[in-house]
Image (tube, rainbow, N blue to C red):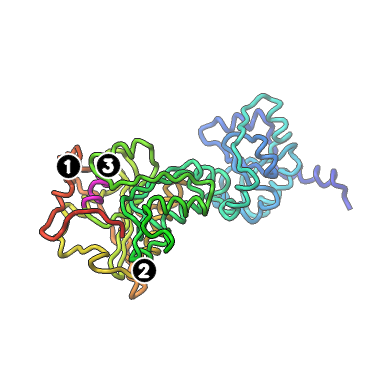
């Protein structure tokens, strides 16, 4: 039976090895290989080669296809000294990967040659435990979780849609959550607005939601705005800097105002709305798809668009729609997946059916079109006013 050294020499004779200078030149070329760091997590956190992806040797066979599905892709594997990566390269060749090399001398030789090293931020032990299920997902991982902790999401409303969206965003570790709401908790809210409770009756919804979210996840900072969004305060609120806006408003003046502000500030807007048993979700991504005005150039007559307070809503429906909004917001924060930009997702709770409608940007849109005619905030209540519509915002 061969010894370890004999087996290592045999494997090295059967694979391709590249030294640090050659690997550096390959990475600087027009078609660089993908670097795969197969060391353990504690080694990775002490420093790694810039641009490398981390797949620990113990998980290589089970995770490599999720990281590199193209078996013809050029790969350079490295460990600390070049031994583990040699065995790993042999394993990938046996899995059908066609262009695999091992970095001779590993990370140690790379540093010895004076080539750049990246010292990553890392999660502490408590955060690794809290977000462990995220860390197992290749599309998220530790880097993605740190993106979430650095992300800032503004919620318009802490009601039916804002409650589930806020809860899941906080649980996921979105570092800063703003909540705009000027309403107080009422007993009629508790059938669907799950961020609140009976003991909170009479409290400001934004303050109640803050207590709930910070109790759920102390990593999250919640900024309550005890005011309704208006043309007078929208710039001040957006000046706090937000990556994504989640619209949980239940009225047209606020929806048009949020849309226009999102377009002018180039902030993705996750829109949701509900009525009785029906809900819809989409993403309005400025300059990459339509905006709310492309979908609804003018508000419908009030009698054709009653609020939840007027028409009712199944209590679980905002939970479904708000969770979908949270999912879209998380993807936008992480920069992964395909958002609902350009797609309107319709949900019928009675039939338990989803339908999708394609949305297109309107070149003649007065806000996001080729020649916009609305370039500053207007009187949105007057714009949406009808004989039976006060225009006062509510939040599902």
**Residue 273, placed above or below residue 287:** below
Q: Earlier in the sequence, mark 2 or mark 1?
A: 2
At 85% from the left and 46% from the top, the residue drawn is: 4
Q: Which residues are magenta?
A: 253-263
**Do the residues under discs 3 and 1 have CB atoms within 8 angstroms?**
no
- Crowding around mark 3 (Cα neighbors within 10 Å: few <14, some 14 to 19, many 20+) is many
Image depth: mark 3 or mark 2 in front: 2
Mark 1 is surrounded, within 10 Å at the Cα level, by few (under 14), some (14 to 19) or many (20 or more) other residues, namely few
Instruction: Tell me how many marks there are.
Output: 3
Residue 72 left/right relative to 84: left
- Please provide percent x and percent y for residue 182: 31, 50
Q: Are marks 3 and 2 in contact (CB under 8 Å)?
A: no
Q: Which residue is mark 1?
A: 378
Residue 23 vertical placement versus 244 (above, below): above
Query: Which numbered disc, 3 or 2, marks the residue that appears first in the sequence?
Result: 3
- Mark 3, secondary structure of its residue: helix
Is residue 241 part of the magenta span, yes or no?
A: no
Q: What residue do we see at 34% from left, 53% from top?
A: 157
Instruction: Quote the CA–CA distance across marks 2 and 1.
Output: 34 Å
Q: CA distance from mark 3 to mark 1?
A: 11 Å
375 shown above or below 215:
above
Q: Residue furthest left?
A: 387
Residue 212: image x %, image y %? 47, 54
Disc sitting over residue 222 in the figure? none
Gap in Å between the C-alphas at discs 3 and 2?
30 Å
Q: Which residue is mark 3?
A: 261
Between 115 and 19, the one nearer to me in the picture: 115
Q: Which residue is mark 2?
A: 315
Q: Secondary structure at mark 2?
A: loop
Residue 106 vs residue 249: left or right? Answer: right
């Amino acid at each position: 039976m061969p010894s370890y050294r004999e087996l290592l020499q045999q494997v090295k004779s059967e694979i391709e090895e590249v030294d640090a200078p050659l690997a550096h030149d390959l990475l600087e070329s027009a078609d660089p290989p993908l670097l795969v760091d197969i060391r353990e997590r504690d080694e990775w956190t002490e420093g790694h080669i810039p641009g490398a992806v981390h797949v620990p040797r113990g998980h290589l066979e089970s995770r490599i296809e999720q990281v590199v599905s193209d078996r013809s892709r050029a790969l350079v594997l490295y460990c600390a000294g070049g031994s583990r990566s040699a065995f790993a390269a042999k394993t990938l060749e046996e899995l059908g990967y066609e262009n695999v090399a091992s970095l001779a001398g590993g990370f140690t030789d790379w540093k010895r040659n004076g080539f750049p090293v990246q010292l990553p931020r890392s999660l502490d032990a408590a955060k690794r435990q809290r977000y462990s299920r995220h860390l197992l997902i290749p599309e998220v991982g530790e880097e993605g979780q740190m993106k979430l902790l650095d992300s800032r999401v503004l919620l318009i409303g802490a009601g039916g849609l804002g409650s589930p969206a806020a809860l899941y965003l906080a649980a996921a570790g979105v570092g800063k959550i703003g909540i705009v709401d000027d309403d107080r908790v009422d007993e009629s809210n508790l059938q669907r607005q799950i961020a609140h409770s009976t003991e909170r009756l009479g409290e400001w919804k934004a303050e109640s939601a803050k207590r709930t979210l910070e109790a759920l996840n102390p990593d999250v900072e919640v900024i309550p705005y005890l005011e309704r969004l208006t043309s007078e305060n929208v710039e001040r609120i957006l000046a706090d800097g937000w990556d994504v806006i989640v619209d949980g408003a239940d009225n047209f003046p606020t929806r048009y105002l949020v849309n226009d502000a999102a377009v002018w500030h180039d902030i993705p807007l996750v829109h949701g709305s509900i009525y009785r048993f029906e809900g819809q979700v989409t993403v309005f991504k400025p300059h990459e798809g339509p905006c709310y005005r492309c979908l609804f150039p003018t508000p419908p007559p009030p009698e054709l668009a009653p609020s939840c307070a007027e028409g009712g809503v199944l209590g679980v429906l905002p939970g479904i729609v708000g969770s979908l909004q949270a999912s879209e917001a998380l993807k936008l924060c992480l920069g992964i997946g395909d958002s609902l930009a350009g797609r309107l997702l319709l949900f019928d709770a009675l039939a338990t059916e989803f339908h999708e409608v394609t949305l297109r940007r309107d070149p003649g849109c007065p806000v996001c079109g080729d020649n916009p005619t609305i370039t500053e905030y207007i009187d949105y209540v007057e714009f949406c006013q009808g004989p039976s519509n006060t225009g006062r915002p509510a939040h599902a």
